[in-house]
Amino acid sequence: MKRLVYLMALIGGCLSASGGPGPLPGSQRVNPAFNASDVVCYCRVRATEIVRERVEVVDERQVKTRQMRAFIEIRDLYKGSIEPSSSPVRVLYEEEIPASRIISPSVAVGDDAIMFFITDAAGTYKFIDPFIGATRISGLSAQFGGDGIIKLRTALEQVLEIKDRVSQLAAMRMLQGIDPVNPALTTALAKLAIADDTEVAAEAIALWLKIDPAVAIQTLYPFMKEHGRALDGIQLANLATQLGTITDGDAVVPLEQLTSSGVSSIRYGAVYALRHLRSTHSYPIFVRLLDDPDLNISYQAVAALAETTGKTGDYGPNMQVFQGSPQRYIRLWKLWWSEYSSTKGPSQ
């Protein structure tokens, strides 16, 4: 988990789906939110009303903060003791107009969404989180039998079969945050990964990377060559983050291939994963990346060489020290490689 958070920060992962402040789509861990919630359900917003409002001056402009109440119809229940027949559930939340920060999920009449609630001592329902608290999605079928997060996972998996791109994207992003991922999804994801819709394809590949990275990268490589320049920063950051969390030794060679990508965030994700896999097979790749035009990637190559060889001292500077004199450390490793490859041979 710490590795994921660190990687997201380095790649620039603190973005919401709208491009504003917030978590990177697909990055939120669903299991902890599920465990901390009192109620998790698939719901429809039947009505909303203003409970009270106040006006404040923020940065020399008027901001209206409203306490709202939403009337929620439960359509399927994944956690909690509420029966769907007991609807509507009354949920309190706040909204800010104009919005300068995200304080609660934004919901509107008619929205279908997966919602996570907590209850206070007075029995009031509130969203557990401003982001994962309500995820708009349509087309979820009621799941008969079973409960818990596996029931939620099954409902999301079925959405991948319907032709609603918005719901498909929402389902894949939430599935990225559920552990474990169902290996049986591979067939559906392989089809979506070659969809004409590049956003759908990118999300499918990101999820596929969690299941079978060595195979998924074989689709990602040509996808990036054809569509990489057209992807936005959020899509690239999601793919790079998933790459960087790979721990499967079978993915070493495919990851090495990705380090030649023309997109720096993808090279970064690939070398970050290789750094932690610590395979001597990757020595030539790390040496090549010492001269990467992106200094962050050059540093990852230095760190990878230091950690894989076990060398310390001047060979293993931290990022701040490296940035002070990058060529010093790059030359040091090139000299090491010249001596090493002359005795061991360049191929590992």
Image (cartoon, helix red, strand yellow):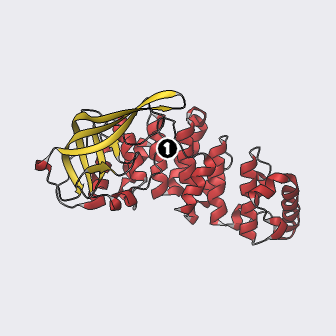
Disc 1 residue type?
Gly
Q: Is residue 269 left or right of residue 315?
A: left
Identify the residue at image location x=70%, y=64%.
281
Examine the rendered structure and indicate whether residue 269 appears above or below residue 161.
below
Q: Position of residue 209 (x, y in %)?
A: 49, 53
Examine the rendered structure and indicate whether residue 123 appears above or below residue 237.
below
In this orientation, which residue lies closer to the viewer: 141 or 323? 323
Asked whether the viewer can see residue 285, the reply is no
Name the residue at the bottom extreme: 310
Q: Position of residue 223 (x, y in %)?
A: 55, 40
The residue identified by callout 1 is 22
Q: Secondary structure at mark 1?
A: loop
Identify the residue at image location x=61%, y=34%.
229
Identify the residue at image location x=70%, y=61%.
282
Identify the residue at image location x=27%, y=61%.
148
Q: Is residue 170 left or right of residue 124?
A: right
Q: Is residue 46 left or right of residue 341?
A: left
